[in-house]
Image: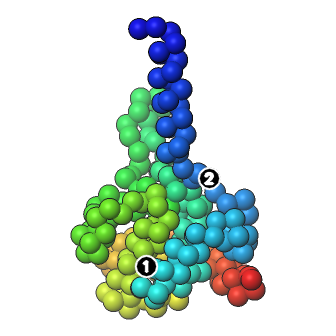
Amino acid sequence: MSSFFRATILVIILVLGSCSSRNYSAPSNLDDACSIVRQYPHYKRAMEMSERKWGLPVHVQMATIYQESKFVGNARTRKEYTFGFIPKGRVSSAYGYAQALDGTWDEYRDKTGNWSGRRNNIYDAADFIGWYMSETRRRAGVSLNNAEHQYLAYHEGQGGYMRGSHKSKSWLLRVASEVGNRSSMYKRQLSRCS
């Protein structure tokens, strides 16, 4: 095979690869909801669609995504190692904006019929969060406006939340409180955005 032919194939592969790449970087200012939706207007469109469908406010979705992935679409959990250097795998199967686990994502796709849904797609991730939290309202009676308790049920699972598994986890209660505070902050900010 000639070096010209190999070089041509390499250039074609690189061009095609760059066409399919996605920008999964976090917004530049995660503490300003207006800045986030100005930088990535499709985020707000995705969350507004989810709000219309499931009733979950945009600011609750935003606070959840911030906590789960910092708005990084291809976020994964950290890798674990044996003896500090032998790879064991990831902490969990959580992936994407919503950090949805494989099993929960499969349940969402089964219940909603969104078989082509991808966890690294903001529209699908927002729909997933809306679906999950509306199920939490139905099963556990948690208001869709209560970001703190919705997050506790999101983290622990609805069954775990109803059993009170979160009550002995002071670190999780602190994190959920931060999610509630961030949701309130995003709500105030979004009300002032143009």
Q: Secondary structure at mark 2?
A: loop
Q: Quadrant of residue 131 in the image?
A: bottom left
Q: Disc 2 residue type?
A: Ser
Query: Of marks 2 and 1, which one's residue comes earlier in the chain?
Result: 2
Looking at the image, residue 13 lies above or below residue 27: above
Name the residue tied to disc 1. Answer: 130
- The C terminus sits in image quarter: bottom right
Camera-side residue of 155 and 5? 5
Looking at the image, residue 127 lies above or below residue 192: above
Q: Residues within 10 Å of mark 2 (few under 14, many from 20)?
A: few
Q: Quadrant of residue 124 in the image?
A: bottom left
Q: Which residue is found at the position 53% from the left and 43% from the top?
A: 19
Name the residue tied to disc 2. Answer: 25
Q: Which residue is found at the position 42% from the left and 85% from the top?
A: 53
Kindly report the distance in space between the C-alpha atoms of the residues bearing marks 2 and 1.
Answer: 23 Å
Residue 180's spot in the image, x, y percent? 59, 80
Question: In the picture provided, is 55 more to the left or to the right than 38?
Answer: left
Residue 103's spot in the image, x, y percent? 28, 61
Q: Which residue is found at the position 38% from the left and 40% from the top?
A: 89
